[in-house]
């Protein structure tokens, strides 16, 4: 044997980490190295002449795996062999290996070389990691399902509470300041609870990537003005000074107005929460070439570099101590960045350090740059005015479609009933929610008939032929979607969903408007007043 061959043979014989086995054309062991003895447990004298099938599991032998690998190696030159194998003592090990054909100079098949390595520990670690990952995915799924159901269950009792305090607004004696203050306090705190519930639902929407956009041409300055209005109570309560600057006075771009308002409101709300009472908040809007820029700056406690790196993570809040705990769930900035990325934009935070305030900067494409981006879930969606689709929204009720395009109010701001909507069928299995809504609607000048389940809703709708049906989604006997489909099939009665469940793309199209509980009663009356 030449020196090179002697070195190769010596390496094969001494390779302890690899089983190197020479097989004859029939798949019987012809040569066996020390690595094969260590891994498989057979001495060379025991192994010589054994069929390679001995080292495969019973199930693989029954499937014909050994012969199939030999056929593949014969035809293609090699076959991979990553699978469970069996040692002499019957224990299993995970092998990563390859079977290669051996031919002589004339091309005739002389046998095979099988090279195997025991990677059982790695395989077991991968399986443990996979099992843990699957467990965490299942836990995350159950958490999202729980949060979604929890938000629905909390919305049901909140709806009659919020409706009730609005009813009391017109019934309390005008001179009873204590009663009026108490009613206003209950209203404020109920709205706070409503927003917390909506935030809970947003957690699952972000995790499941179920946030959808309704794209149209919008003015970012007008959207920012609406965002300011939504957080004004928090700013006024903490006596902050808010300055607003816009140059130019109008910034047009393509986007979902509800979601853009939500993102800007989240930044303003964050500034209001963390800035000490009497602090300053600056909202600045402008253009940087083809990019719209929105800055929210405060003179609050600022952020450390460590917190800046984590401030957009879910449930993260800066540690302000018990005395300065701002409350909330810590998802506002996470949601804002997610919504802006769906628009092809960005959100970044900056601070010179603790005590130096913070600034959060939004960048959004405009003009031709806006047409270049395609956010996930946006392709093919229409302008919201062209169809009755329901945008998801966490601040305030979700109201969409031809019923939600404006409102008529009297001098005091109360919505007036449209003359063409007189009779309303109100369907809700929650007695308190139904009764409180009935009182509110009757005070607004409507004739109201109640139904408690899906079957009763259909019977009364066909018998009474109301001018409009307000329909809960989660109903006994027949759910609200089934009722809506049947009414759509047989009548042209306008349908308004009033539900604790968030709207889904496929189902929201059944309704002329979709309101999410607890809807502010003024909003409900306004939606009805718009039907002419």
Image (spheres, rainbow, N blue to C red):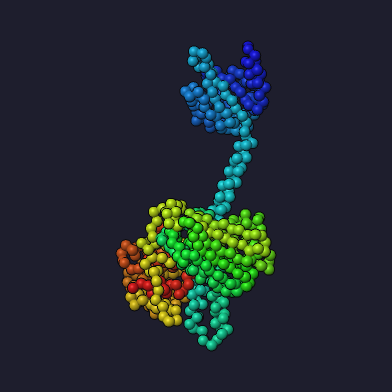
Q: Which residue is drawn at 54% across and 88% down?
A: 175
The answer to whether 5 is drawn above or below residue 464 in the figure is: above
Say whether residue 301 is left or right of residue 62.
right
> Whole-percent x and y of residue 107?
49, 15
Q: Which residue is drawn at 49% across and 68% down?
A: 225
The quadrant where residue 121 appears: top right
Image quadrant assignment for residue 41: top right
Q: Position of residue 387 (x, y in %)?
A: 36, 61
Residue at left offset 36%, top offset 72%:
531
* Residue sitting at x 62%, y 40%: 125
Residue 443 picture location, percent across and down: 43, 80
From this viewpoint, is residue 145 visible? no
Rendering coords of residue 456 (x, y %): 38, 69
Q: Nearer the viewer, residue 417 or 363?
A: 363
Query: Quadrant of the image for the C terminus?
Result: bottom left
Q: In which quarter of the image is the N terminus?
A: top right
Q: Closer to the camera, 148 or 532? A: 532
Instruction: Tell which residue pokes out farthest to the bottom in this image.
Output: 175
Relative placement, left or right, of 12 versus 72 is: right
């Amino acid at each position: 044997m030449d020196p090179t061959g002697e070195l190769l043979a010596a390496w094969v014989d001494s390779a302890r980490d690899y089983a190197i086995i020479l097989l004859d054309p029939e798949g019987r062991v012809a040569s066996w190295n020390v690595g094969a003895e260590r891994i498989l447990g057979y001495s060379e004298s025991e192994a010589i002449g054994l069929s390679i099938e001995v080292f495969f599991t019973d199930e693989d032998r029954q499937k014909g795996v050994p012969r199939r690998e030999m056929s593949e190696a014969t035809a293609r030159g090699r076959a991979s062999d990553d699978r469970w194998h069996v040692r002499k003592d019957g224990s299993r090990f995970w092998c990563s290996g390859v079977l290669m054909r051996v031919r002589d100079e004339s091309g005739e098949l002389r046998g095979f070389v099988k090279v195997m390595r025991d990677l059982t520990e790695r395989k077991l670690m991968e399986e443990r990691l996979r099992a843990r990952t699957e467990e965490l995915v299942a836990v995350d799924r159950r958490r999202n399902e729980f949060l979604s159901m929890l938000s629905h269950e909390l919305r049901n009792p909140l709806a009659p509470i919020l409706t009730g305090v609005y009813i009391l607004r017109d019934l309390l004696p005008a001179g009873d300041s204590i009663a009026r203050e108490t009613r206003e306090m209950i209203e404020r705190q109920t709205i706070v609870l409503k927003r917390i519930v909506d935030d809970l639902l947003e957690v699952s929407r972000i995790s499941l990537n179920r946030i959808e956009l309704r794209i149209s041409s919008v003015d970012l300055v007008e959207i920012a003005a609406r965002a300011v209005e939504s957080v004004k109570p928090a700013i006024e309560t903490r006596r902050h000074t808010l300055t607003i600057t816009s140059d130019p006075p109008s910034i047009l771009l393509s986007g979902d107005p509800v979601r853009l308002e939500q993102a800007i409101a989240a930044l303003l709300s964050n500034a209001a929460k963390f800035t000490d009472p009497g602090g300053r908040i600056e909202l600045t809007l402008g253009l940087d070439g083809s990019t719209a820029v929105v800055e929210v700056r405060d003179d609050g406690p600022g952020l450390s570099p460590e917190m800046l790196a984590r401030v957009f993570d879910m449930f993260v809040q800066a540690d302000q101590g018990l005395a300065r705990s701002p409350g909330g769930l810590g998802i506002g900035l996470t949601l804002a960045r997610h919504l802006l990325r769906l628009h092809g934009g960005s959100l970044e935070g900056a601070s010179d350090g603790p005590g130096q305030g913070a600034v959060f900067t939004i960048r959004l494409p405009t003009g031709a740059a806006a047409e270049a981006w395609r956010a996930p879930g946006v392709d093919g969606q229409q302008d919201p005015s062209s169809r009755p689709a329901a945008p998801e929204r966490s601040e305030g009720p979700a109201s969409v479609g031809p019923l939600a395009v404006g409102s008529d109010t009297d001098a005091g701001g109360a919505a007036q009933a449209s003359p063409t909507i007189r009779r309303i069928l109100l369907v809700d299995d929650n007695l308190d929610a139904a009764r409180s809504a009935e009182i509110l609607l009757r005070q607004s000048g409507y004739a109201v008939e109640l139904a408690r389940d899906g079957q009763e809703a259909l019977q009364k709708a066909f018998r009474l032929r109301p001018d409009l049906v307000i329909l809960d989604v989660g109903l006994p006997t027949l759910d609200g979607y089934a009722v809506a489909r049947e009414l759509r099939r047989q009548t042209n009665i306008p349908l308004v969903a009033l539900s604790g469940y968030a709207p889904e793309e496929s189902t929201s199209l059944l309704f002329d408007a979709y309101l999410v509980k607890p809807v502010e009663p003024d909003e409900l009356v306004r939606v009805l007043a718009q039907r002419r």
